[in-house]
Image (cartoon, rainbow, N blue to C red):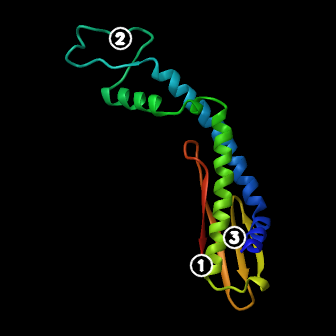
C-alpha cells in the first residue's frame, strides 16, 4: 500500500500545491475577519425594549438584538486566543497538509478494496482546474477517482475524492 500512496502523491502534486495556496489565501482573509469581528464585539450592546426609553446607547456603541449580542459574546469567549493571531494561519496550513495526506491514504485504501493488482498499476491524471481526475488501471480493472473542491470567501477550502 505504501507504493500506491507514493505514486498517488506523485500524481497529485498539482492538487496539493493549489489546495495549499487556496488554504493560505483563505486563512489570511479569515484572520482579518476574526480580528474585525473581535473589534466589533467590544462595541456591541443591546437595549432591552422595556428599558429603551430610559437609556440610549453611546455614540461608540453598536446596538444589536439580544440574540446577536449573545452569539457574538459566545464566539469571542469560546474562540481560542490563536484565532486572532498569526498562529491561525500556521495551524490552518498544518490542518490542510494533514487533510491532504489523510485523503491520499483513504484513497489508496479504497483502491485496494477494488481488488486491483498493485504491481501492474498505471495511473493517468488530468487537471480540470481546480479539480483533478485520475484513471487507475491494472490492465483488467479500471478505477476512476476525481476530486470535488469547495471553497469560498467564508468557506474554508476543502475537497473530497469520489471513486467509481
User: Which badge, 3 or 1, is on the more N-terminal residue?
Assistant: 3
What's the mark number on residue 133? 3
- From where the camera sits, is residue 33 visible? no
Residue 15: image quadrant is bottom right
For the residues labelled 3 and 1, the Cα–Cα distance comes to 11 Å
For the residues labelled 2 and 1, the Cα–Cα distance comes to 60 Å
- Camera-nearest label, 2 or 1: 1
Q: Which residue is mark 1?
A: 164
User: Which badge, 2 or 1, is on the more N-terminal residue?
Assistant: 2
86 displayed left or right of 74: right
Residue nearer the viewer, 24 or 83:
83
Q: Position of residue 33 (x, y in %)?
A: 56, 32
Please, what secondary structure does the residue beneath circle 2 have? loop
Q: Give me the residue at 68% from left, 88% from top.
A: 141
Please, what secondary structure does the residue beneath circle 3 have? strand
Residue nearer the viewer, 48 or 88:
88
Mark 2, Cα crowd under 10 Å, few <14 / some 14-19 / many 20+, is: few
For the residues labelled 3 and 2, the Cα–Cα distance comes to 57 Å
Q: Is residue 152 above or below residue 86?
A: below
Name the residue at the bottom extreme. Answer: 140
Q: Is residue 11 above or below residue 115?
A: above
Name the residue at the left extreme. Answer: 50
Mark 1, Cα crowd under 10 Å, few <14 / some 14-19 / many 20+, is: few
32 displayed left or right of 52: right
Q: Give me the residue at 61% from left, 50% from top.
A: 157
Q: Which residue is mark 2?
A: 57
Q: Position of residue 25 (x, y in %)?
A: 68, 41
Amino acid at each position: 500500500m505504501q507504493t500506491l500512496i507514493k505514486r498517488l502523491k506523485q500524481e497529485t502534486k498539482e492538487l496539493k500545491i493549489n489546495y495549499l495556496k487556496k488554504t493560505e489565501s483563505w486563512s489570511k482573509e479569515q484572520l482579518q475577519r476574526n480580528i474585525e469581528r473581535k473589534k466589533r464585539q467590544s462595541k456591541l450592546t443591546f437595549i432591552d425594549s422595556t428599558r429603551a426609553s430610559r437609556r440610549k446607547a453611546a455614540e461608540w456603541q453598536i446596538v444589536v438584538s439580544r440574540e446577536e449580542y449573545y452569539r457574538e459574546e459566545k464566539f469571542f469567549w469560546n474562540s481560542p486566543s490563536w484565532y486572532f493571531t498569526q498562529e491561525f494561519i500556521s495551524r490552518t496550513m498544518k490542518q490542510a497538509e494533514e487533510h491532504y495526506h489523510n485523503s491520499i491514504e483513504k484513497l489508496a485504501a479504497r483502491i485496494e478494496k477494488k481488488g486491483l493488482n498493485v504491481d501492474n498499476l498505471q495511473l493517468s491524471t488530468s487537471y480540470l482546474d481546480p479539480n483533478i481526475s485520475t484513471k487507475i488501471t491494472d490492465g483488467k480493472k479500471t478505477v476512476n477517482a476525481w476530486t470535488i473542491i469547495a471553497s469560498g470567501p467564508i468557506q474554508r477550502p476543502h475537497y473530497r475524492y469520489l471513486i467509481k
